[in-house]
Image (cartoon, rainbow, N blue to C red):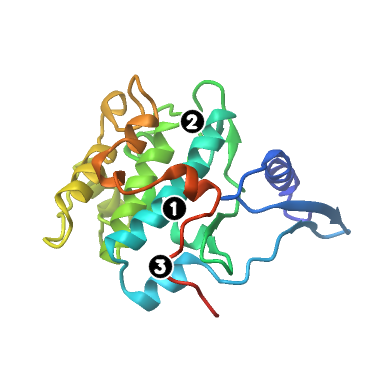
């Protein structure tokens, strides 16, 4: 309240209140005092994906694919209601006791029916259209999805720099290298997600997000069973 973050918090509450999906955290209620606004959401016992990824160094492709399918389903749901997430990163993905994921932290999420111009997100995950201050829509979430796929399988994001300027130059100039242990299908889906031209980025063309779902990398995934949490996770967690 003191730092005039009420609008930001109320926006997050509105988004959370509207969500009913197994891959997003549940919102219960909110209250405030003279200093803070509090949001009550479900308690997720397994910690966050960032901590687990650092512990494991990197995930094998089967595990990365299992997690990626859930993020895809969350984004498919959000985009159906014209909600941009805009802050995908391992720190914002929680691991439930059953080994499934929950997307959390909707502070940057926004209802957008057209385009928006807000500069927000995490530097390693910023899409080129945000760096260049261009208007954007759902394309930004699919760019960050590609970054997450790379980080889960490699243990680090694809782009780097000594400072933010060098990092952004690397992003805009597409300076990254695929590890030689990536499968051809994984490299292909990431390559098609990390496309500068939004009109040809995977998930942003005529078929929309379905182009991602039918990509060969996901051939072994049953998205319906993932949605209903009927697949056995490769790992369960006891933090």
Say whether marks 3 and 2 touch (CB < 8 Å): no
Report, in whole angstroms, how far the alpha carbon at label 3 lies from the one at label 2.
39 Å
Q: Residues within 10 Å of mark 2 (few under 14, many from 20)?
A: few
Look at the picture and state if 46 lies above or below 78: below
Q: Residue at x 46, y 57 (%)?
A: 231
Residue 191 is labelled as none
Q: In the structure shown, which secondary structural element does the residue marked by tag 1 occupy?
A: loop
Q: Residues within 10 Å of mark 3 (few under 14, many from 20)?
A: few
Q: In the drawing, does residue 38 fall left or right of residue 15?
A: right
* Residue 58 image-quadrant placement: bottom left
The residue where tag 3 is placed is 234
- N-terminal-most mark, 3 or 2: 2
* Residue 86 appears anywhere in the view: no
Which circle, 3 or 2, is nearer the viewer? 3
- N-terminal-most mark, 1 or 2: 2
Which circle, 1 or 3, is nearer the viewer? 3
Q: In the drawing, does residue 146 fall left or right of residue 216?
A: right
Q: Residue at x 31, y 74 (%)?
A: 57
Q: In the drawing, does residue 36 fall left or right of residue 59?
A: right
Q: In the drawing, does residue 229 fall left or right of residue 64?
A: right
Nearest to the observer: residue 31 or residue 68: 68
Q: Residue at x 74, y 42 (%)?
A: 17
Say whether marks 1 and 2 touch (CB < 8 Å): no
- Residue 26: where, in percent of width, then height? 69, 52
- Residue 189: where, in percent of width, then height? 25, 43
Look at the picture and state if 113 lies above or below 55: above
* Residue 211 image-quadrant placement: top left
Residue 122 is labelled as 1
Q: In the structure shown, which secondary structural element does the residue marked by tag 3 occupy?
A: loop
- N-terminal-most mark, 1 or 3: 1
Q: Residue furthest right?
A: 33
């Amino acid at each position: 309240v003191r730092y005039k973050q009420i609008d930001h918090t109320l926006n997050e509450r509105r988004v959370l209140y509207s969500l009913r999906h197994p891959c997003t955290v549940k919102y219960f209620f909110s209250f405030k005092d003279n200093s803070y606004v509090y949001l009550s959401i479900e308690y997720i016992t397994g910690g966050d994906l960032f901590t687990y990824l650092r512990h494991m160094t990197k995930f094998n492709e089967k595990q990365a694919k299992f997690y990626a399918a859930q993020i895809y389903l969350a984004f498919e749901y959000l985009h159906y209601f014209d909600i941009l997430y805009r802050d995908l990163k391992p720190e914002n993905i929680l691991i439930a006791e059953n080994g499934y994921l929950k997307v959390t932290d909707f502070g940057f999420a926004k209802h957008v029916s057209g385009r928006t111009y807000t500069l927000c997100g995490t530097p390693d995950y910023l899409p080129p259209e945000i760096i260049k201050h261009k208007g954007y829509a759902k394309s930004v979430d699919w760019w960050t999805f590609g970054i997450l796929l790379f980080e889960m399988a490699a243990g680090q994001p694809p782009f780097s720099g000594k400072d933010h300027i060098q990092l952004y130059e690397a992003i805009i100039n597409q300076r990254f290298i695929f590890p030689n242990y990536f499968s051809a299908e994984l490299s292909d889906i990431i390559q098609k997600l990390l496309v500068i031209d939004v009109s040809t980025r995977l998930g942003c063309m005529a078929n929309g997000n379905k182009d991602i779902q039918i990509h060969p990398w996901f051939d072994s995934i049953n998205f319906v069973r993932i949605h209903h949490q009927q697949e056995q996770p490769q790992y369960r967690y006891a933090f």
